[in-house]
């Protein structure tokens, strides 16, 4: 079983998240609801710092994974009492504002995304936030805005290295066929244009992001080497403005049925050795940026749900694809644990756990084996749900967005109320 003592775990008297019983959370706030373990989040942040020790690194949390303002504030503040300050990667004007409000310093923020509107670009330029550009049309918009305002926009060049990340096709982003990043010919054209407009454009970095949940570490290595080589070629051809290489995100977590994926330490090692083998000292000195999203928040979150009823092999629960769309969208396999009803793969009865939404794809967990047939109102928790859980939730079927509860020791705090119907 995946549950560990830190975060969600089983005790003799039921399911717990840190020092709080899940049934107390469910009784107080009703289900479906998200619960987050602060201790588990801190564990990830500490593990990251250890893995990247000795590197000049700026981790920019990809807020799209979980953009609850309180969680963002915690990650931003973590910076104040640890040696390693965190930045944030935003992909919309909304995320930029929430990030700044949460206390992320603008110089530690990035603005990513393939289609940014002028109003969003203006906001980023005014706050001197680095914009990772992905197209020539975006470059033109930035030049026009910066000229008009008399400002010098700070940009990163997000390249598309045409590398197959061997992940789910819907979360693969680094191949030519994907809409993301600058191809080699676009990059050449962009550099020419930047030369002409250097008074209003400052190229601070180069970046790439080839996909999410990357188990095949060799694909990530290929992209990393591509970036380091590119930085070298910038330096040997006389470019002097580069400050960072941004290796993107994609660090995996273990979902149900998976083998243990490569740890964050293995990714840090790839960066270390790529930098050791680079051609120029200028590249060696660059700051390292990474943009982890899932890895930071997936495992600190669980979706609490209660059984509505059981018919044949269907366990119908009160959570659905509107709270957690990952199984329906990516065939993702999340672990589910029922209170007082452990799964026994060999001996038990097989079930699908489904939600109330009027879609056959509304399946949360498939083919689990339980010792007993669950009873009405029995509590369960869907694990690894802290990333791309609430942040992808919807109002489909007019279902209200669920509340989010932060667990700190024995305390529970509502960090987002259930949406009013
Ligand atoms: N940076 C950029 C530019 C991104 O587009 C993403 C994710 C990340 C960083 C963070 O990637 P991560 O470290 O979380 O793998 N909804 C999907 C995942 C979509 C990821 C989109 N981009 C899922 O639930 O699996």
Image (cartoon, rainbow, N blue to C red):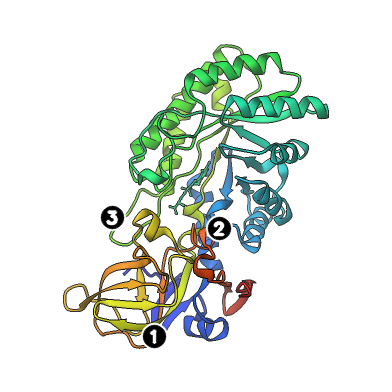
Element at badge 1? loop
Residue highlighted by disc 2? 66
Residue furthest out toward the top: 237
Q: CA distance from mark 1 to mark 2?
A: 27 Å
Q: Is residue 94 visible?
A: yes
Between 309 and 233, the residue placed more toward the observer is: 309
Horizontal side of 56 relative to 10 (left or right) equals: right
332 relative to 172, above or below: below
Bin the neighbour count of mark 3 within 10 Å (Cα to Cα): few under 14, some 14-19, many 20 and up. few
Q: Dot 1: within a 10 Å radius of its alpha carbon, few (fewer than 14), some, or many (20 or more) residues?
A: some
Q: From the viewer's perspective, is 367 left or right of 119? A: left
Label 1, on which residue?
378
**Which comes sooner in the sequence, label 3 or label 2?**
2
User: Which of the 4 image quadrants contains residue 58?
Assistant: top right
Pointers 3 and 2 in contact (C-beta within 8 Å): no
For discs 3 and 2, the disc positioned in front in the rendered view: 2
Asked whether the residues under the numbered discs 1 and 2 touch, taking CB atoms below 8 Å apart as contact, a structural biologist would say no
For mark 3, what is the residue?
259
Residue 407 location, x and y as percent?
56, 73
- Observer-side mark, 3 or 1, equals 1
């Amino acid at each position: 079983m995946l549950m560990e003592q830190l975060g969600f775990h089983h005790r003799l008297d039921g399911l717990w998240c840190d020092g709080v019983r899940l049934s107390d959370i469910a009784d107080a706030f009703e289900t479906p609801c998200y619960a987050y373990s602060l201790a588990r989040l801190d564990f990830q942040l500490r593990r990251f710092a250890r893995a990247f020790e000795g590197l000049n690194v700026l981790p920019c949390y990809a807020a799209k994974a979980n953009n609850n303002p309180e969680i963002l504030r915690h990650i931003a503040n973590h910076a104040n009492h640890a040696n390693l300050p965190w930045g944030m990667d935003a992909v919309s004007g909304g995320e930029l504002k929430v990030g700044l409000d949460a206390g992320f310093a603008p110089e530690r923020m990035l603005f990513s995304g393939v289609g940014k509107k002028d109003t969003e670009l203006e906001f980023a330029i005014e706050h001197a936030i680095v914009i990772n550009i992905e197209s020539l049309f975006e470059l033109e918009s930035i030049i026009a805005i910066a000229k008009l305002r008399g400002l010098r926009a700070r940009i990163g060049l997000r390249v598309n290295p045409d590398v197959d990340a061997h992940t789910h096709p819907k979360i693969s982003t680094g191949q030519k066929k994907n809409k993301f990043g600058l191809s080699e010919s676009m990059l050449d054209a962009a550099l020419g244009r930047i030369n002409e407009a250097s008074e209003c454009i400052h190229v601070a970095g180069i970046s790439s992001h080839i996909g999410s949940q990357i188990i095949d570490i060799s694909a990530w290595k290929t992209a990393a080497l591509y970036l380091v080589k590119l930085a070298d070629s910038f330096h040997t051809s006389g470019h002097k403005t580069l400050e960072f290489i941004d290796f993107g995100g994609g660090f995996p977590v273990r979902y149900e049925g998976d083998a243990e994926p490569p740890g964050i330490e293995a990714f840090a090692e790839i960066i270390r050795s790529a930098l050791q083998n680079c051609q120029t000292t200028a590249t060696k000195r660059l700051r390292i940026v990474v943009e982890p999203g899932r890895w930071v928040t997936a495992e600190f979150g669980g979706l609490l749900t209660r059984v509505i009823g059981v018919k044949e092999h269907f366990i119908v629960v009160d959570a659905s694809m509107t709270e957690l769309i990952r199984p329906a969208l990516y065939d993702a396999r999340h672990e589910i644990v029922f209170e007082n009803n452990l799964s026994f793969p060999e001996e038990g009865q097989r079930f699908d756990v489904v939600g109330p939404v009027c879609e056959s794809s509304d399946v949360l967990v498939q083919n689990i084996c339980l010792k007993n047939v669950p009873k009405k109102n029995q509590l369960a928790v869907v694990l690894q749900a802290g990333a791309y859980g609430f942040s992808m939730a919807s109002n489909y079927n007019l279902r209200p967005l669920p509340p989010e509860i932060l667990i700190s020791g024995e305390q529970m705090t509502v960090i987002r109320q259930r949406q009013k119907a």
